[in-house]
Amino acid sequence: MTKSVFTDQYQTFLSMLVKERKKANLTQVQLASTLKKPQSFISKYEKGERRLDVIEFLDIARAIGFDETLFISKLK
């Protein structure tokens, strides 16, 4: 079984996260500040170097301001 971080679906997930961040007019630095994380945290997950867990995803969704349920429903 392939690790999910290497699947096309996970790459789509990351692309969607980047799109949501940019749609909210947030830089990586601004989002990181809101999450109280270093900017490298944002950079690493956006590039696929770091895998997000579900709690981190929910925190990111809330910080950016998008509906996480709707987001996931688009991931089919």
Image (cartoon, rainbow, N blue to C red):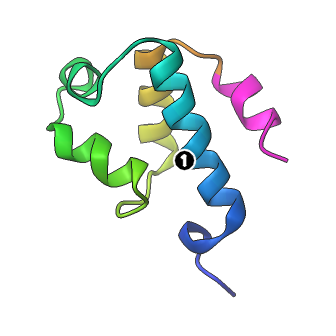
- Quarter holding the N terminus is bottom right
Closest to the observer, 57 or 48: 48
Q: How many marks?
A: 1
**Is residue 32 placed above or below 3 in the rendered structure?**
above
Residue that badge 1 annotates: 14
Residue that lies at the very extreme toward the bottom in this rendered image: 1
Task: State the image coordinates of residue 67 (x, y, percent, origin top left).
Answer: 65, 17
Asked whether, in this view, residue 19 is left or right of residue 52, the answer is right
Task: State the image coordinates of residue 37 (x, y, percent, origin top left).
Answer: 18, 34
Most prominent secondary structure in the magenta stretch?
helix
**Is residue 12 placed above or below 27 in the rendered structure?**
below
Query: Toward which corner of the image does residue 30 lie, by quadrant?
Result: top left
Residue lying at 46% horizontally and 22% vertically, measured from the top left: 22
Say whether residue 10 is magenta: no
Query: Toward which corner of the image does residue 26 lie, by quadrant?
Result: top left
Disc 1 secondary structure class: helix
Magenta segment boundaries in residue numbering: 68-76
What amino acid is labelled 1 in the image? Leu
Residue lying at 43% horizontally and 60% vertically, measured from the top left: 48
Task: State the image coordinates of residue 34 (x, y, percent, origin top left).
Answer: 25, 17
